[in-house]
Amino acid sequence: MLFVTVISVTGGTAVASSTTAAVVAVVITALFSVALGLRRLSPPLALSLAWAAAVLQMLAMLPPLPVNLAILAVLYGCAAYGSQRIFWLGFSSAIVGALAITVYLLVPSMSYALTAAGSELLWLIVNGGVLFIAAVLGLLLSWTVGALVRTGMRARETAALQRQAEARATAEFERNRIARDMHDVVAHSLAVVIAQADGARYAAVADPEAAVGALQTISTTARSALSDVRMLLTQLRHSQAEGPQPTVADLEGLYAQVRAAGVDLRVDVDPAPPGEPPAAVQLAVYRILQEALTNALRHGSGGAVAVGLAWLPDRVSLRVHNPVAGGAEPAPSAGIAASTPVPAGGHGLIGMRERAQLIGGALSAGPDDGGFTVVATLPIGGAR
């Protein structure tokens, strides 16, 4: 900027015919130089100073100066860094400025051309058109480059915001997943503990050995639940830590816990899993069975609970049926249609349905044959 100022002052002083003109040239150079320095910090002020300097130059009838090139940088700054209003003011300034340059440069020839022959007037019109087009292209080129830079910066900002939104969505998804796991672990374990504690209380006098066995089951279940809760809390503190997840190999332990709570559990697996099912399917099967058996333990009438698993090549079908005391239909909960009765509270059923939908499956639950039945179909091939 200092180099442009020195050259402009020198050139302006050389072409000035008087001391006044030289002073005006220095002022114009200063205005353009300040506008050049403010083009990014304050595009509106830079544009205003550039216009003030240009008007002063035309009023003083000074010839073009080297510092006039600052106009290109100012238009670039308006397009790249200005507000929406300054963006379009810069565009308008390029058009109006090109017209002003054309008229200003042709003023000395106008009076002569208007009194001359038609060929001279035609020459003036053609030259004026060419000059206007050249000025428009030159000014709009700088503005267009700034507009492209502005678009690139907006694209980077949009991409950064999108990455932040995706990160927040991922974190929310993880929190919801951990919340579902926490519900499944705590609800199932507490249901087993409560059932065992009730049994131990009644058996304490009549059958002390049964009471000792019940207390042992309570201890084992509570320790297992505590371990699972600690793992989930670790995942909350360290979002990258996945931790081990239940698989179909853990189903036998789940069945053993339910049977230890006094439930007559009958499991039928036909056909068996072909190979190693996807981890997402194994986790969904385990958690859905865990919640369904917990509901059977809490709300069942004490009769036999039937579990059916069919591991087909493209899907796994799951069915859990338990009798309900007195044939009463459980009340629906929030988030489930009124036509679908669910156990009191119903949050577990919502979680089961979400787990099924998460891997592209479907789950239905409701009263059936004097009891309550949960049916789920989970695809194997498209599971993530």
Image: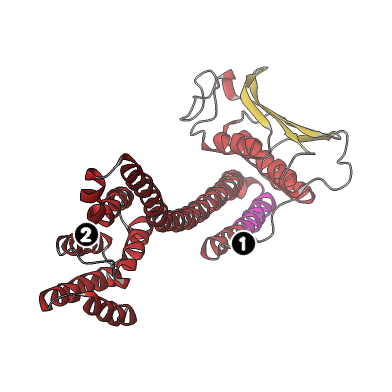
Kindly indicate the quadrant of the structure image that contains residue 42. bottom left
Residue 261 location (% of width, % of height): 66, 44
Residue 173 magenta? no
**Along the viewing direction, whichever of 235 and 167 lies nearer the viewer:** 167
Q: Which mark is residue 175?
A: none
Amino acid tagged 2: Trp
Q: Quadrant of residue 49?
A: bottom left
Residue 209 shown in magenta? yes
Question: How far from the left and from the top, in percent, is residue 175?
Answer: 52, 52
Secondary structure predominantly adopted by residues drawn in magenta: helix
- For label 1, the crowd category at 10 Å Cα-Cα, with few meaning under 14, some 14 to 19 and many 20 or more, is few
The residue closer to the viewer here, 330 or 156, is 156
Q: List the single residue furthest toward the left.
A: 20
The kind of secondary structure element at disc 1 is helix
Q: Give the residue pinned by disc 1.
A: 227
User: Quarter of the image containing the N terminus?
Assistant: bottom left
Query: Quick check: 68 left or right of 290?
Result: left
Above or below: residue 329 compared with residue 1: above
Mark 2 lies on residue: 51
- N-term mark: 2 or 1: 2
Q: Which residues are magenta?
A: 207-225
Looking at the image, residue 319 sits to the left or right of residue 49; the answer is right
